[in-house]
Amino acid sequence: MGIPDDSIGIVETKYFTFAAPPHEMVLESGERLGPITLAYETYGQLDKDKSNAILVAHALSGDAHAAGLHHEEKTPGWWDSMIGPGKAMDTDKYFVVASNVIGGCKGSTGPASTNPKTGRPYGQDFPIVSIKDMVDAQVQLLDHLGIERLLTVTGGSMGGMQALQWMVSYPERIRSAIPISTALKHTPQQIAFDEVGRQAIMADPNWSEGNYYDHSPPAKGLAVARMVGHITYMSEASMAEKFGRKMKESKGPMKFSPDFEVEGYLEYRGENFVKRFDANSYLYITKAMDYFDVVGRKTPAEIFKGLKAKVLVIAFKSDWLYPAHQSQEIVKACKWAGVEATYCEVHSTYGHDAFLLESGEETRLIKHFLSSVHASGDGPGKAASHEIRLPGNR
């Protein structure tokens, strides 16, 4: 298969291990975890003054493979449309770092990893991890790479939560942040959808209280969880356009087989997800998202107080899982704190998936924003907020 001219080409996943006993990482829960391995990839070259580094944080089911191609696979990274020569995160200008979160299952330490105390997979003995724990681990990786300050940190959905956590926990280590399709905290509705997915997994007879690694995994439960999740990632308009009420070719009497194309699509998505994701990681990561509350006991005006970084917040009009008003709350909190913030709401029909699919609009916005941050130096800017509404490309 030929490699496109705007691709960064063949990339390699690397691994960084830290927090070896007795220097385990202390988690937000108070529990200790170590050693910890993070899977990560880098794209582009780090400047001599190390001022051009971008951290890309992934969403629930993402991983370290954000761009380029692996030798053994034909599928590019999950944000390949945004990372590479001439793209939003131009690897001719910037050094991009992407890592798999702790609690994950694509190379980083998680429930499927070996517990050094037992020699067996952690399973449900793995401690609860938070978005803050994920960010604290990323800090260790950046220290390992010699990066003291990021040009920006960005990501969509759970990746946006990580960007917000950086703004709160490590404001002095970022020059800007780009949270996309995300929220300061989950609403009851968002928690409810996650809980349905978790219950589907735990109701599967193969779940075995999380100790399924020596036999068949809870595939049916995880597939149902993914089906429910995928419904929330789309919009009514995108589902109507993609499927309508089209029927599949039926062989035999109509009962409860997936007769509609949308049913077959959801089954396909669920079955494929089972092949690449661990059910316990799904439980732990969705719980981390539900626990996330960057406001906490503070007022919205206090959470970003003292932050000198510039902020670009992107939302999508048809996203009903993380509706635009939640992104607007982020901008309001920035304004109250005197942080320079720009709000952009893109008119797209893709729903929550838009942050992965609307690469044209996102590229224009992010390219301009990064150029201004990169050229501006470290001086603080005046507080500002702008609203830009762009037409979708569909």
Image: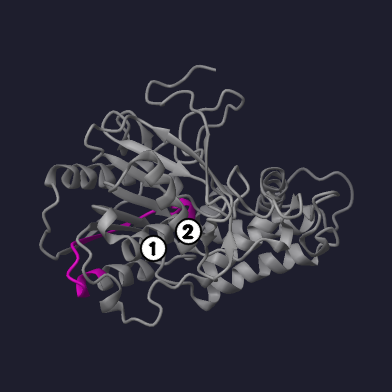
Name the quadrant containing residue 82: top left
Viewer-side residue, 388 vs 17: 17
Residue 116, disc: none
* Position above or below: 394 against 208: above
Residue 384: x and y in percent read: 15, 64
- Marked residue nearer the N-terminal end (2 or 1): 2
Categorize mark 2 by other alpha carbons within 10 Å: few (<14), some (14-19), many (20+): many
Residue 227 visible in rendering:
no
Magenta region: which residues?
334-354
Residue with the mark numbered 2: 158
Q: Residue at x 49, y 75 (%)?
A: 187
Give yes or no for residue 96 being in the magenta stretch: no
Which secondary structure, mark 1? helix
Mark 2: which amino acid? Met
Residue 162 visible in rendering:
yes
Residue with the mark numbered 1: 165
Q: Residue at x 79, y 50 (%)?
A: 213
Name the quadrant containing residue 326: bottom left
Q: Residue at x 24, y 69 (%)?
A: 334
Mark 1: which amino acid? Gln
